[in-house]
């Protein structure tokens, strides 16, 4: 099996991001965080040992709604990386491009994160360790 390491040797899988209509329908006692800049509510759960980020749109202008309406539930894969800027540069030759500047978020304890996209592989969230 071919091994790819687009984001660097220290990159580690963190979670899958899934679009859901209602977090409470899946997990009635989850801790829900409202992420105003991304226009979603979110919660993390474990599913057979894998971390899932449940993302619920928080309005009609939520960016995840279009994908949900077309039946797409899997939104992104997230990897933790030791150096965010280096990871972004390393994945460019493979056709990834950054979607906006890096941001900080309370969901990751104020660490920086960035979104990168490739037509071949889709959307990835990179979170600095």
Image (spheres, grey):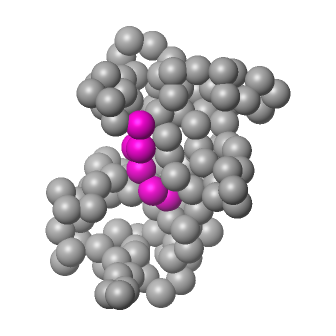
The vertical placement of 93 against 17, above or below, is below
- Quadrant, the C terminus: bottom right
Quick check: 111 left or right of 37? right
Range covered by the magenta-colored residues: 73-78
The vertical placement of 92 against 39, above or below, is below
Q: Quadrant of residue 14?
A: bottom right
Q: Quadrant of residue 77?
A: bottom left
Q: Nearer the viewer, residue 91 or 71?
A: 71
Q: Residue furthest top?
A: 60
Q: Nearer the viewer, residue 53 or 97?
A: 53
Which residue is depicted at the point 49% across and 40% down?
18
Which residue is depicted at the point 53% across and 83% down?
10
Residue 41 x %, y %? 58, 27
Q: Is residue 41 visible?
A: yes
Count of all numbered marks drawn on residues in the image? 0
The vertical placement of 127 against 29, above or below, is below
Residue 68 x %, y %? 36, 27
Which residue is depicted at the point 61% across and 33% down?
42
- Quadrant, the N terminus: bottom left
Magenta span has 74?
Answer: yes
Residue 87 x %, y %? 40, 74
Q: Is residue 102 visible?
A: no
Q: Nearer the viewer, residue 28 or 11?
A: 28
Q: Quadrant of residue 111?
A: bottom right
**Magenta residues, dominant SS class:** strand
Magenta span has 100?
Answer: no
């Amino acid at each position: 099996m071919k091994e790819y390491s687009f984001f660097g040797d220290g990159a580690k899988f963190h979670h899958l991001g899934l679009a859901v209509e209602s977090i409470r329908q899946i997990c009635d006692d989850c801790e829900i965080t409202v992420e105003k800049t991304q226009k979603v509510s979110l919660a993390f759960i474990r599913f057979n040992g894998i971390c899932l980020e449940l993302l619920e749109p928080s309005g009609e202008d939520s960016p995840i709604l279009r994908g949900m309406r077309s039946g797409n539930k899997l939104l992104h894969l997230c990897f933790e990386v030791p150096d965010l800027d280096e990871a972004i540069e390393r994945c460019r030759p493979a056709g990834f491009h950054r979607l906006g500047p890096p941001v900080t978020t309370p969901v990751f304890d104020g660490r920086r994160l960035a979104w990168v996209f490739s037509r071949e592989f889709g959307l990835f969230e990179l979170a600095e360790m």
